[in-house]
Image (cartoon, rainbow, N blue to C red):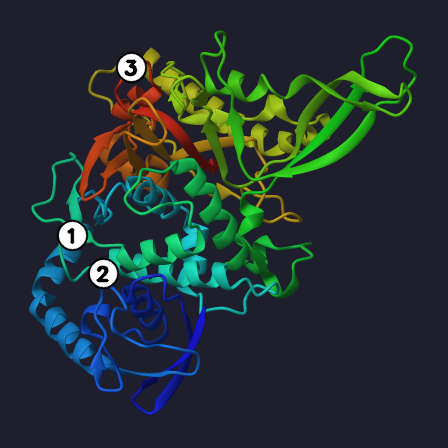
Amino acid sequence: MTKINVRCGSKVLAVEVDLNESPMLLKAQLFALTEIPPERQKLLIKGKAIGDENWNGIAVKDGSTIMLMGGSALATKESTNVNTENLEEKESNEKKAKTESHIVLPAGLANLGNTCYMNATIQCFKVIPELNQAIKKYTGGGQNENENSHAADITKMLKKLYEQMDSGASRPRVIAADLTESDQTITVTPLLFLHVLHNIFPQFELGEQQDANECFCELLRLISDELIVPIDNENNTGSSNNENQIRLKKFFEIKYQVKTKCLEEGSTEEVQTSEETGYQASCFLSQSVRYIQSGIKCKMTEEIEKQSEELGRDAKYEKSSLIDRLPAYLSVQIVRFFFKEKENINAKILKDVKFPMVLDMYDTCTPELQEKLKPARQHLAEYEETRMEMLRNAKLAEDPEAKKPCLTPKGFYPNTFSDDIGSNNSGFYELKALITHKGRASNSGHYVAWIRVGDGDDDVEEKNTKNNNQENVGNSKWAACDDTDVYPVSEAEILKLSGGGDWHCAYVLLYGPKKIPML
Protein backbone atom coordinates (compact mmCIF):
# COMPACT_ATOMS: atom_id res chain seq x y z
CA MET A 1 0.00 0.00 0.00
CA THR A 2 1.28 3.47 -0.95
CA LYS A 3 0.52 6.39 1.36
CA ILE A 4 -0.45 9.55 -0.54
CA ASN A 5 -2.04 12.92 0.14
CA VAL A 6 -5.15 14.02 -1.72
CA ARG A 7 -5.83 17.75 -1.82
CA CYS A 8 -9.52 18.61 -2.11
CA GLY A 9 -10.15 22.33 -1.89
CA SER A 10 -8.61 23.53 1.36
CA LYS A 11 -8.45 20.04 2.86
CA VAL A 12 -5.70 17.44 2.59
CA LEU A 13 -6.70 13.79 2.99
CA ALA A 14 -4.24 11.04 3.91
CA VAL A 15 -5.11 7.93 1.89
CA GLU A 16 -3.55 4.52 1.33
CA VAL A 17 -3.79 3.39 -2.28
CA ASP A 18 -3.16 -0.03 -3.82
CA LEU A 19 -1.40 0.55 -7.15
CA ASN A 20 -2.15 -3.03 -8.19
CA GLU A 21 -5.83 -2.05 -8.42
CA SER A 22 -7.37 0.39 -10.88
CA PRO A 23 -7.65 4.11 -10.01
CA MET A 24 -11.41 3.54 -9.76
CA LEU A 25 -10.80 1.93 -6.36
CA LEU A 26 -9.11 5.15 -5.19
CA LYS A 27 -12.15 7.07 -6.42
CA ALA A 28 -14.34 4.72 -4.40
CA GLN A 29 -12.28 5.51 -1.28
CA LEU A 30 -12.54 9.24 -1.98
CA PHE A 31 -16.29 8.93 -2.52
CA ALA A 32 -16.60 7.49 1.00
CA LEU A 33 -14.54 10.38 2.40
CA THR A 34 -15.87 13.32 0.37
CA GLU A 35 -19.24 12.14 -1.01
CA ILE A 36 -18.14 13.33 -4.45
CA PRO A 37 -19.43 10.72 -6.97
CA PRO A 38 -16.63 8.98 -8.91
CA GLU A 39 -18.01 10.12 -12.26
CA ARG A 40 -17.50 13.76 -11.14
CA GLN A 41 -14.01 13.21 -9.77
CA LYS A 42 -10.98 14.35 -11.76
CA LEU A 43 -7.61 13.33 -10.35
CA LEU A 44 -4.44 15.22 -11.29
CA ILE A 45 -0.81 14.62 -10.39
CA LYS A 46 1.76 17.16 -11.54
CA GLY A 47 -0.71 18.44 -14.11
CA LYS A 48 -1.34 14.98 -15.61
CA ALA A 49 -4.84 13.48 -15.48
CA ILE A 50 -5.23 10.00 -13.98
CA GLY A 51 -7.54 7.66 -15.90
CA ASP A 52 -10.00 5.15 -14.46
CA GLU A 53 -8.53 1.94 -15.88
CA ASN A 54 -4.83 1.86 -14.92
CA TRP A 55 -1.81 3.78 -13.61
CA ASN A 56 0.18 3.61 -16.88
CA GLY A 57 2.48 6.60 -17.23
CA ILE A 58 1.65 7.83 -13.71
CA ALA A 59 4.44 7.91 -11.12
CA VAL A 60 3.03 7.59 -7.61
CA LYS A 61 5.11 7.00 -4.51
CA ASP A 62 4.84 7.49 -0.75
CA GLY A 63 4.13 11.13 0.03
CA SER A 64 2.86 12.03 -3.48
CA THR A 65 0.13 14.66 -3.65
CA ILE A 66 -2.86 14.22 -5.94
CA MET A 67 -5.34 16.99 -6.71
CA LEU A 68 -9.03 16.10 -6.56
CA MET A 69 -11.25 18.26 -8.75
CA GLY A 70 -15.05 18.17 -8.67
CA GLY A 71 -16.93 19.80 -5.79
CA SER A 72 -20.07 18.51 -4.16
CA ALA A 73 -21.91 21.77 -4.86
CA LEU A 74 -22.72 20.66 -8.39
CA ALA A 75 -24.09 17.38 -7.09
CA THR A 76 -26.20 19.22 -4.54
CA LYS A 77 -27.54 21.59 -7.17
CA GLU A 78 -28.42 18.78 -9.56
CA SER A 79 -30.00 16.79 -6.75
CA THR A 80 -32.15 19.80 -5.86
CA ASN A 81 -33.27 20.14 -9.46
CA VAL A 82 -34.16 16.46 -9.65
CA ASN A 83 -36.11 16.67 -6.41
CA THR A 84 -38.01 19.73 -7.67
CA GLU A 85 -38.87 18.08 -10.97
CA ASN A 86 -40.16 14.98 -9.20
CA LEU A 87 -41.94 16.73 -6.32
CA GLU A 88 -45.40 16.36 -7.84
CA GLU A 89 -44.72 12.72 -8.67
CA LYS A 90 -43.56 11.97 -5.11
CA GLU A 91 -46.59 13.73 -3.59
CA SER A 92 -48.84 11.68 -5.85
CA ASN A 93 -47.20 8.47 -4.66
CA GLU A 94 -47.55 9.50 -1.01
CA LYS A 95 -51.26 10.14 -1.48
CA LYS A 96 -51.60 6.79 -3.21
CA ALA A 97 -49.79 5.07 -0.36
CA LYS A 98 -52.23 6.53 2.18
CA THR A 99 -55.39 5.61 0.30
CA GLU A 100 -54.74 2.03 -0.83
CA SER A 101 -52.98 -1.11 0.26
CA HIS A 102 -49.51 -1.26 -1.21
CA ILE A 103 -46.09 -2.78 -1.02
CA VAL A 104 -42.71 -1.28 -1.82
CA LEU A 105 -40.28 -2.98 -4.16
CA PRO A 106 -36.53 -2.58 -3.58
CA ALA A 107 -34.18 -1.19 -6.19
CA GLY A 108 -32.42 -3.59 -8.53
CA LEU A 109 -28.65 -4.09 -8.60
CA ALA A 110 -26.66 -4.28 -11.81
CA ASN A 111 -24.72 -7.47 -12.49
CA LEU A 112 -21.09 -6.49 -13.04
CA GLY A 113 -19.96 -9.86 -14.32
CA ASN A 114 -21.11 -12.87 -12.29
CA THR A 115 -21.84 -10.71 -9.24
CA CYS A 116 -25.31 -12.13 -8.62
CA TYR A 117 -23.93 -13.81 -5.46
CA MET A 118 -23.07 -10.37 -4.05
CA ASN A 119 -26.32 -8.73 -5.19
CA ALA A 120 -28.42 -11.47 -3.58
CA THR A 121 -26.56 -11.10 -0.28
CA ILE A 122 -27.00 -7.30 -0.25
CA GLN A 123 -30.75 -7.63 -0.87
CA CYS A 124 -31.12 -10.19 1.95
CA PHE A 125 -29.36 -8.01 4.53
CA LYS A 126 -31.69 -5.14 3.71
CA VAL A 127 -34.74 -6.90 5.21
CA ILE A 128 -33.22 -6.74 8.72
CA PRO A 129 -34.68 -3.66 10.52
CA GLU A 130 -31.93 -3.51 13.14
CA LEU A 131 -29.25 -3.49 10.44
CA ASN A 132 -31.02 -0.68 8.58
CA GLN A 133 -31.43 1.30 11.80
CA ALA A 134 -27.77 0.89 12.75
CA ILE A 135 -26.34 1.62 9.31
CA LYS A 136 -28.33 4.85 8.96
CA LYS A 137 -26.72 6.11 12.18
CA TYR A 138 -23.28 4.82 11.27
CA THR A 139 -20.77 7.66 11.16
CA GLY A 140 -17.61 5.83 10.16
CA GLY A 141 -14.74 3.95 11.77
CA GLY A 142 -14.00 3.94 15.46
CA GLN A 143 -17.23 2.25 16.58
CA ASN A 144 -15.39 -1.06 16.85
CA GLU A 145 -12.85 -1.08 19.65
CA ASN A 146 -10.72 -3.50 17.60
CA GLU A 147 -10.42 -0.80 14.91
CA ASN A 148 -10.92 -3.20 12.01
CA SER A 149 -10.37 -0.95 8.99
CA HIS A 150 -11.81 -3.57 6.63
CA ALA A 151 -15.05 -3.65 8.61
CA ALA A 152 -15.25 0.15 8.54
CA ASP A 153 -14.55 0.32 4.79
CA ILE A 154 -17.16 -2.25 3.77
CA THR A 155 -19.74 -0.80 6.18
CA LYS A 156 -19.25 2.71 4.77
CA MET A 157 -19.76 1.46 1.25
CA LEU A 158 -22.82 -0.57 2.22
CA LYS A 159 -24.32 2.54 3.79
CA LYS A 160 -23.70 4.53 0.59
CA LEU A 161 -25.19 1.74 -1.50
CA TYR A 162 -28.33 1.49 0.64
CA GLU A 163 -28.75 5.27 0.46
CA GLN A 164 -28.71 5.01 -3.33
CA MET A 165 -31.19 2.15 -3.27
CA ASP A 166 -33.51 4.06 -0.93
CA SER A 167 -33.51 7.23 -3.03
CA GLY A 168 -37.15 7.87 -3.93
CA ALA A 169 -36.47 10.62 -6.47
CA SER A 170 -35.66 8.29 -9.33
CA ARG A 171 -38.88 6.32 -9.60
CA PRO A 172 -42.25 5.59 -8.03
CA ARG A 173 -41.83 2.52 -5.82
CA VAL A 174 -45.41 2.03 -4.65
CA ILE A 175 -47.27 -0.75 -6.40
CA ALA A 176 -50.77 -2.13 -5.91
CA ALA A 177 -51.46 -4.90 -3.44
CA ASP A 178 -52.73 -7.14 -6.25
CA LEU A 179 -49.05 -7.55 -7.23
CA THR A 180 -49.25 -5.63 -10.50
CA GLU A 181 -45.84 -4.31 -11.43
CA SER A 182 -44.83 -0.69 -11.35
CA ASP A 183 -44.21 1.15 -14.61
CA GLN A 184 -40.68 2.16 -13.76
CA THR A 185 -37.83 0.61 -11.85
CA ILE A 186 -34.47 1.88 -10.70
CA THR A 187 -31.14 0.12 -11.05
CA VAL A 188 -28.16 0.88 -8.84
CA THR A 189 -24.68 -0.05 -10.00
CA PRO A 190 -22.68 -1.39 -7.00
CA LEU A 191 -19.30 -0.80 -8.64
CA LEU A 192 -17.70 0.92 -5.66
CA PHE A 193 -18.96 -1.72 -3.25
CA LEU A 194 -17.60 -4.45 -5.53
CA HIS A 195 -14.14 -2.85 -5.61
CA VAL A 196 -14.00 -2.62 -1.81
CA LEU A 197 -15.31 -6.19 -1.47
CA HIS A 198 -12.63 -7.50 -3.83
CA ASN A 199 -9.94 -5.49 -2.05
CA ILE A 200 -10.88 -7.04 1.31
CA PHE A 201 -11.62 -10.54 -0.01
CA PRO A 202 -9.31 -11.26 -2.95
CA GLN A 203 -10.75 -14.79 -3.18
CA PHE A 204 -13.88 -13.24 -4.72
CA GLU A 205 -12.22 -12.92 -8.11
CA LEU A 206 -13.72 -10.35 -10.45
CA GLY A 207 -15.71 -11.81 -13.32
CA GLU A 208 -16.03 -15.27 -11.77
CA GLN A 209 -19.02 -16.79 -9.98
CA GLN A 210 -18.60 -17.22 -6.21
CA ASP A 211 -20.39 -19.02 -3.39
CA ALA A 212 -23.23 -16.81 -2.12
CA ASN A 213 -23.13 -18.34 1.36
CA GLU A 214 -19.42 -17.58 1.71
CA CYS A 215 -20.12 -13.97 0.73
CA PHE A 216 -23.09 -13.88 3.15
CA CYS A 217 -21.00 -15.14 6.10
CA GLU A 218 -17.92 -13.01 5.41
CA LEU A 219 -19.91 -9.78 5.03
CA LEU A 220 -22.03 -10.56 8.08
CA ARG A 221 -18.88 -11.20 10.13
CA LEU A 222 -17.45 -7.75 9.35
CA ILE A 223 -20.63 -5.67 9.30
CA SER A 224 -22.26 -7.17 12.39
CA ASP A 225 -19.13 -6.53 14.45
CA GLU A 226 -18.91 -2.92 13.24
CA LEU A 227 -22.54 -1.78 13.55
CA ILE A 228 -24.09 -0.79 16.87
CA VAL A 229 -27.84 -1.04 17.48
CA PRO A 230 -29.40 1.45 19.93
CA ILE A 231 -31.64 -0.27 22.46
CA ASP A 232 -35.00 1.07 23.63
CA ASN A 233 -34.91 1.66 27.41
CA GLU A 234 -38.32 0.04 27.82
CA ASN A 235 -37.02 -3.23 26.37
CA ASN A 236 -33.66 -3.01 28.09
CA THR A 237 -34.69 -3.53 31.70
CA GLY A 238 -32.05 -5.53 33.49
CA SER A 239 -29.68 -5.50 30.56
CA SER A 240 -25.99 -5.12 31.21
CA ASN A 241 -25.29 -3.46 27.85
CA ASN A 242 -23.33 -0.24 28.20
CA GLU A 243 -25.14 2.96 27.27
CA ASN A 244 -28.13 1.04 25.89
CA GLN A 245 -26.18 -0.12 22.85
CA ILE A 246 -25.40 -3.55 21.50
CA ARG A 247 -23.44 -4.83 18.54
CA LEU A 248 -25.44 -6.24 15.66
CA LYS A 249 -23.60 -9.57 15.94
CA LYS A 250 -25.61 -10.39 19.11
CA PHE A 251 -28.73 -10.60 16.93
CA PHE A 252 -27.15 -13.56 15.07
CA GLU A 253 -25.24 -15.32 17.85
CA ILE A 254 -26.14 -18.97 18.54
CA LYS A 255 -24.80 -20.64 21.67
CA TYR A 256 -24.60 -24.42 21.90
CA GLN A 257 -24.26 -26.66 24.94
CA VAL A 258 -22.01 -29.51 23.79
CA LYS A 259 -21.65 -32.83 25.62
CA THR A 260 -18.97 -35.37 24.66
CA LYS A 261 -19.15 -38.98 25.90
CA CYS A 262 -16.57 -41.70 25.27
CA LEU A 263 -18.09 -44.83 23.68
CA GLU A 264 -15.12 -47.18 24.16
CA GLU A 265 -15.51 -50.18 26.47
CA GLY A 266 -13.63 -49.86 29.72
CA SER A 267 -13.55 -46.07 29.60
CA THR A 268 -14.43 -44.29 32.83
CA GLU A 269 -14.20 -40.77 31.45
CA GLU A 270 -16.89 -38.41 32.66
CA VAL A 271 -19.14 -36.66 30.18
CA GLN A 272 -17.46 -33.43 29.16
CA THR A 273 -19.63 -30.31 28.82
CA SER A 274 -18.54 -27.25 26.87
CA GLU A 275 -19.99 -24.23 25.07
CA GLU A 276 -19.65 -23.35 21.39
CA THR A 277 -20.71 -20.23 19.53
CA GLY A 278 -21.88 -19.96 15.93
CA TYR A 279 -23.62 -17.49 13.64
CA GLN A 280 -25.35 -19.81 11.19
CA ALA A 281 -27.18 -23.14 11.39
CA SER A 282 -26.59 -25.84 8.81
CA CYS A 283 -29.09 -28.20 7.25
CA PHE A 284 -27.20 -31.34 6.21
CA LEU A 285 -28.74 -33.47 3.49
CA SER A 286 -29.09 -37.24 3.43
CA GLN A 287 -31.46 -39.69 1.86
CA SER A 288 -33.84 -39.49 4.82
CA VAL A 289 -33.89 -35.67 5.11
CA ARG A 290 -37.01 -34.20 3.55
CA TYR A 291 -37.56 -31.16 5.77
CA ILE A 292 -35.17 -28.44 6.92
CA GLN A 293 -35.91 -29.17 10.61
CA SER A 294 -34.68 -32.76 10.33
CA GLY A 295 -31.59 -31.63 8.38
CA ILE A 296 -30.66 -29.23 11.18
CA LYS A 297 -31.13 -31.85 13.90
CA CYS A 298 -29.43 -34.76 12.14
CA LYS A 299 -25.91 -33.49 12.86
CA MET A 300 -26.60 -32.27 16.39
CA THR A 301 -25.80 -35.81 17.56
CA GLU A 302 -22.88 -37.47 15.82
CA GLU A 303 -20.03 -39.88 16.36
CA ILE A 304 -16.53 -38.42 16.28
CA GLU A 305 -13.00 -39.69 16.82
CA LYS A 306 -10.44 -37.91 18.95
CA GLN A 307 -7.50 -38.53 21.27
CA SER A 308 -8.39 -40.08 24.63
CA GLU A 309 -6.02 -39.17 27.45
CA GLU A 310 -7.27 -42.09 29.53
CA LEU A 311 -6.79 -44.73 26.81
CA GLY A 312 -3.75 -43.10 25.23
CA ARG A 313 -5.10 -43.48 21.70
CA ASP A 314 -7.79 -42.25 19.36
CA ALA A 315 -11.23 -43.27 20.58
CA LYS A 316 -14.83 -42.96 19.48
CA TYR A 317 -16.98 -40.34 21.16
CA GLU A 318 -20.61 -39.27 20.91
CA LYS A 319 -20.93 -35.52 20.51
CA SER A 320 -24.38 -34.10 21.20
CA SER A 321 -25.28 -30.42 20.88
CA LEU A 322 -28.31 -28.46 22.02
CA ILE A 323 -28.97 -24.77 21.55
CA ASP A 324 -28.59 -22.74 24.74
CA ARG A 325 -29.29 -19.33 23.13
CA LEU A 326 -31.46 -18.59 20.12
CA PRO A 327 -30.64 -15.42 18.15
CA ALA A 328 -33.20 -12.92 16.94
CA TYR A 329 -32.21 -13.75 13.34
CA LEU A 330 -31.37 -17.28 12.31
CA SER A 331 -29.65 -17.94 9.00
CA VAL A 332 -29.68 -21.51 7.73
CA GLN A 333 -27.48 -22.90 4.99
CA ILE A 334 -28.83 -25.93 3.16
CA VAL A 335 -25.58 -27.78 2.48
CA ARG A 336 -26.19 -28.56 -1.18
CA PHE A 337 -22.62 -28.58 -2.51
CA PHE A 338 -19.96 -31.27 -2.18
CA PHE A 339 -16.57 -31.66 -3.83
CA LYS A 340 -16.58 -34.04 -6.77
CA GLU A 341 -12.95 -35.09 -7.06
CA LYS A 342 -13.25 -36.70 -10.49
CA GLU A 343 -14.54 -33.54 -12.13
CA ASN A 344 -12.82 -31.16 -9.67
CA ILE A 345 -15.99 -29.15 -9.00
CA ASN A 346 -18.36 -28.46 -6.11
CA ALA A 347 -21.31 -30.48 -7.37
CA LYS A 348 -24.84 -29.74 -6.24
CA ILE A 349 -27.45 -31.87 -4.48
CA LEU A 350 -30.76 -31.06 -6.18
CA LYS A 351 -32.85 -32.80 -3.50
CA ASP A 352 -36.25 -31.32 -2.64
CA VAL A 353 -36.04 -30.09 0.98
CA LYS A 354 -39.19 -28.43 2.30
CA PHE A 355 -38.83 -25.31 4.43
CA PRO A 356 -41.61 -23.67 6.49
CA MET A 357 -42.74 -20.07 6.56
CA VAL A 358 -42.81 -20.40 10.37
CA LEU A 359 -39.91 -22.35 11.85
CA ASP A 360 -40.07 -23.78 15.39
CA MET A 361 -36.67 -24.41 17.00
CA TYR A 362 -38.02 -25.55 20.40
CA ASP A 363 -36.96 -29.20 19.99
CA THR A 364 -33.31 -28.25 19.36
CA CYS A 365 -32.95 -26.33 22.65
CA THR A 366 -31.66 -27.33 26.06
CA PRO A 367 -34.27 -28.12 28.74
CA GLU A 368 -33.28 -24.92 30.57
CA LEU A 369 -33.90 -22.77 27.48
CA GLN A 370 -37.16 -24.59 26.73
CA GLU A 371 -38.47 -23.54 30.15
CA LYS A 372 -37.60 -19.91 29.38
CA LEU A 373 -39.39 -20.10 26.02
CA LYS A 374 -42.69 -21.36 27.46
CA PRO A 375 -44.28 -18.02 28.54
CA ALA A 376 -44.10 -16.46 25.06
CA ARG A 377 -45.25 -19.72 23.46
CA GLN A 378 -48.20 -19.79 25.85
CA HIS A 379 -49.21 -16.27 24.77
CA LEU A 380 -49.22 -17.37 21.12
CA ALA A 381 -51.19 -20.54 21.92
CA GLU A 382 -53.85 -18.52 23.79
CA TYR A 383 -54.19 -16.10 20.89
CA GLU A 384 -54.57 -18.91 18.34
CA GLU A 385 -57.07 -20.73 20.56
CA THR A 386 -59.20 -17.59 20.92
CA ARG A 387 -59.06 -16.94 17.18
CA MET A 388 -60.10 -20.50 16.32
CA GLU A 389 -62.95 -20.38 18.84
CA MET A 390 -64.31 -17.22 17.20
CA LEU A 391 -64.18 -18.86 13.78
CA ARG A 392 -65.94 -22.00 15.05
CA ASN A 393 -68.72 -19.96 16.63
CA ALA A 394 -69.19 -17.97 13.43
CA LYS A 395 -69.41 -21.17 11.40
CA LEU A 396 -72.01 -22.66 13.76
CA ALA A 397 -74.15 -19.52 13.43
CA GLU A 398 -74.63 -20.38 9.73
CA ASP A 399 -75.46 -16.82 8.79
CA PRO A 400 -74.27 -16.36 5.17
CA GLU A 401 -74.60 -12.57 5.41
CA ALA A 402 -72.53 -12.26 8.55
CA LYS A 403 -68.96 -11.04 8.21
CA LYS A 404 -66.12 -13.16 9.48
CA PRO A 405 -65.14 -12.16 13.04
CA CYS A 406 -62.02 -10.07 13.49
CA LEU A 407 -59.59 -10.63 16.35
CA THR A 408 -57.43 -7.53 16.42
CA PRO A 409 -54.36 -7.73 18.69
CA LYS A 410 -53.94 -4.95 21.22
CA GLY A 411 -50.27 -5.01 20.39
CA PHE A 412 -47.37 -7.44 20.39
CA TYR A 413 -45.28 -8.91 23.18
CA PRO A 414 -41.51 -8.34 23.15
CA ASN A 415 -39.77 -11.02 21.09
CA THR A 416 -36.49 -10.93 23.01
CA PHE A 417 -35.49 -11.63 26.62
CA SER A 418 -35.16 -8.39 28.60
CA ASP A 419 -31.78 -9.46 29.99
CA ASP A 420 -30.47 -10.69 26.63
CA ILE A 421 -31.27 -8.22 23.87
CA GLY A 422 -30.83 -9.77 20.44
CA SER A 423 -32.16 -13.18 21.49
CA ASN A 424 -35.40 -14.99 20.59
CA ASN A 425 -37.74 -15.68 23.51
CA SER A 426 -40.30 -17.99 21.84
CA GLY A 427 -38.41 -20.33 19.53
CA PHE A 428 -40.66 -19.31 16.62
CA TYR A 429 -39.25 -17.70 13.48
CA GLU A 430 -40.75 -16.28 10.29
CA LEU A 431 -39.01 -16.55 6.95
CA LYS A 432 -37.78 -13.09 5.91
CA ALA A 433 -35.55 -13.81 2.91
CA LEU A 434 -33.77 -16.58 1.05
CA ILE A 435 -31.11 -16.99 -1.61
CA THR A 436 -31.63 -19.60 -4.30
CA HIS A 437 -29.19 -21.14 -6.74
CA LYS A 438 -29.97 -22.32 -10.26
CA GLY A 439 -27.36 -24.59 -11.80
CA ARG A 440 -25.25 -27.66 -11.06
CA ALA A 441 -22.13 -26.24 -9.36
CA SER A 442 -21.36 -23.51 -6.79
CA ASN A 443 -18.90 -21.72 -9.11
CA SER A 444 -21.42 -21.50 -11.93
CA GLY A 445 -25.14 -20.98 -12.36
CA HIS A 446 -27.12 -18.05 -11.00
CA TYR A 447 -28.18 -16.70 -7.59
CA VAL A 448 -31.42 -14.82 -6.85
CA ALA A 449 -32.68 -13.22 -3.61
CA TRP A 450 -36.33 -13.53 -2.60
CA ILE A 451 -37.31 -11.09 0.15
CA ARG A 452 -40.43 -10.39 2.18
CA VAL A 453 -41.73 -6.90 1.43
CA GLY A 454 -45.14 -7.03 3.10
CA ASP A 455 -46.76 -9.12 5.80
CA GLY A 456 -50.16 -9.56 7.43
CA ASP A 457 -48.64 -8.97 10.87
CA ASP A 458 -47.30 -5.55 9.87
CA ASP A 459 -50.77 -4.07 9.81
CA VAL A 460 -53.12 -6.66 11.24
CA GLU A 461 -55.89 -4.24 12.10
CA GLU A 462 -56.01 -2.75 8.60
CA LYS A 463 -56.00 -6.17 6.93
CA ASN A 464 -58.71 -7.53 9.22
CA THR A 465 -60.89 -4.48 8.63
CA LYS A 466 -60.58 -4.61 4.86
CA ASN A 467 -60.50 -8.34 4.27
CA ASN A 468 -62.33 -9.75 7.35
CA ASN A 469 -59.78 -12.55 7.17
CA GLN A 470 -57.90 -14.05 10.11
CA GLU A 471 -55.58 -16.23 8.09
CA ASN A 472 -52.29 -14.40 7.61
CA VAL A 473 -50.74 -17.36 5.83
CA GLY A 474 -50.71 -16.55 2.14
CA ASN A 475 -51.13 -12.80 2.73
CA SER A 476 -47.40 -12.15 2.78
CA LYS A 477 -45.97 -10.22 -0.14
CA TRP A 478 -42.61 -11.12 -1.58
CA ALA A 479 -40.25 -9.77 -4.21
CA ALA A 480 -37.80 -11.62 -6.42
CA CYS A 481 -34.54 -9.67 -6.74
CA ASP A 482 -32.87 -11.07 -9.83
CA ASP A 483 -30.12 -8.46 -10.27
CA THR A 484 -31.79 -5.56 -12.13
CA ASP A 485 -35.06 -7.46 -12.54
CA VAL A 486 -37.18 -6.94 -9.41
CA TYR A 487 -40.76 -8.16 -9.47
CA PRO A 488 -43.46 -9.20 -6.97
CA VAL A 489 -44.23 -12.84 -6.22
CA SER A 490 -46.65 -14.64 -3.92
CA GLU A 491 -45.96 -16.79 -0.89
CA ALA A 492 -47.06 -19.86 -2.85
CA GLU A 493 -44.28 -19.23 -5.36
CA ILE A 494 -41.73 -18.96 -2.54
CA LEU A 495 -42.70 -22.41 -1.22
CA LYS A 496 -41.96 -23.89 -4.66
CA LEU A 497 -38.26 -23.03 -4.27
CA SER A 498 -37.52 -26.13 -2.18
CA GLY A 499 -35.55 -27.84 -4.95
CA GLY A 500 -35.92 -31.14 -6.75
CA GLY A 501 -34.80 -30.07 -10.22
CA ASP A 502 -32.83 -27.58 -12.27
CA TRP A 503 -35.09 -24.72 -11.16
CA HIS A 504 -34.04 -22.35 -8.35
CA CYS A 505 -33.24 -24.30 -5.17
CA ALA A 506 -33.23 -22.71 -1.73
CA TYR A 507 -29.63 -22.40 -0.50
CA VAL A 508 -29.51 -19.78 2.30
CA LEU A 509 -32.57 -18.93 4.38
CA LEU A 510 -32.88 -15.97 6.74
CA TYR A 511 -35.46 -16.27 9.52
CA GLY A 512 -36.53 -13.43 11.82
CA PRO A 513 -38.55 -13.32 15.07
CA LYS A 514 -42.25 -14.13 14.85
CA LYS A 515 -44.54 -11.53 16.37
CA ILE A 516 -46.56 -12.71 19.38
CA PRO A 517 -50.00 -10.98 19.36
CA MET A 518 -51.41 -9.56 22.57
CA LEU A 519 -55.06 -10.24 23.49
At mark 1, the secondary structure is: loop
The residue at the point 69 percent across, 54 percent down is 238
The x and y percentages for residue 228 are 52, 60
Residues at discs 2 and 1 in contact (Cβ within 8 Å): yes
Of mark 1 and mark 3, the one earlier in the sequence is: 1
Which of these two is toward me, 437 or 384? 437
Mark 3 → mark 2, Cα distance in angstroms: 38 Å
The N terminus: image quadrant: bottom left
The residue at the point 65 percent across, 58 percent down is 241
Give residue 33's quadrant in the image: bottom left
From this view, report whether residue 304 is shown above or below residue 44.
Answer: above
Which of these two is toward me, 408 or 158? 158
Residue 53 left/right relative to 352: left
Q: Disc 2 marks which residue?
A: 167
Q: Disc 3 marks which residue?
A: 501
> Mark 1 or mark 3, which is nearer to you?
3
From this view, report whether residue 47 is shown above or below residue 327.
Answer: below
